[in-house]
Image (cartoon, grey):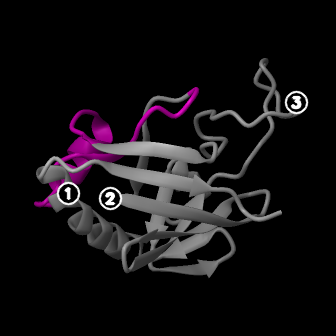
């Protein structure tokens, strides 16, 4: 199974996009793309992932369920169906990138937030509803041992 995230707009504060899997469609919100040099300053070219500041580079990543950590425990307590966080694997320069609930780029910390619709610039709405729908759609694939992937495509310049 493959999810497609098409980034649509980077405002300098956030990145908005559209996530599709089969016939399902969601809006997304991520951190912005920032150029960061090796000293951690935001000035040298080159997209790298830094916690709380940047979105993940475009590419194709495997998604698995992560059954450890604070977020997993929080979601397990919140949702009876929860089996693990939607973990985007092998992102260069970062360990735990998830697809999860949130409303603005402050909630992202570099992860991908899903929602039903874009409320205003850099604010998405009905994120929990969208997350539950996406999660329940993907869960049978995980439970049957099917691989789940996400392809992230940058916005058209």
**Cα–Cα gap, marks 3 and 2:** 36 Å
Q: Which residues are magenta?
A: 65-93
Spot occupied by residue 17 in the image (x, y as percentages of width and height): 60, 68
Residue visible at 21% across and 67% down in the picture: 136
Is label 1 in a helix, a strand or a loop?
helix
Q: Are the residues tagged 3 and 2 within 8 Å (C-beta)?
A: no
Q: CA distance from mark 1 to mark 3?
A: 40 Å
Q: Position of residue 132 (x, y in %)?
A: 27, 69
**Earlier residue among tags 1 and 3:** 3
Spatial CA distance of label 1 from label 2 is: 8 Å
Callout 2 secondary element: loop
Quadrant location of the C terminus in the rendered image? bottom right
Task: Kindly report which numbered mark, 1 or 3, lies closer to the viewer in this rendering.
Answer: 1
Q: Is residue 135 left or right of residue 93?
A: left
Q: Is residue 111 above or below residue 130?
A: above
On whether residue 87 falls in the magenta region, the answer is: yes
Residue 80 in sight here: yes
Residue displayed at 89% across by 33% down = 43
The tag on residue 1 is: 2
């Amino acid at each position: 199974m493959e999810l497609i995230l098409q980034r649509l707009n980077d405002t300098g504060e956030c990145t908005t996009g559209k996530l599709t899997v089969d016939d399902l469609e969601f809006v997304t919100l991520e951190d912005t793309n920032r150029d960061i040099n090796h000293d951690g300053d935001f000035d040298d070219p080159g997209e790298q992932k830094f916690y709380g500041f940047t979105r993940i580079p475009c590419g194709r990543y495997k998604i698995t369920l992560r059954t450890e950590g604070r977020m997993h425990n929080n979601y397990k307590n919140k949702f009876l169906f929860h089996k693990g966080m939607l973990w985007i694997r092998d992102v260069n320069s970062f360990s735990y990138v998830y697809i999860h609930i949130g409303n603005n780029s402050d909630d992202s910390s570099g992860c991908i937030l899903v929602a039903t619709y874009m409320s205003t610039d850099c604010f998405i709405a009905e994120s929990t509803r969208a997350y539950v729908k996406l999660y329940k759609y993907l869960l049978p694939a995980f439970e049957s041992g099917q691989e789940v992937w996400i392809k992230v495509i940058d916005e058209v310049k």
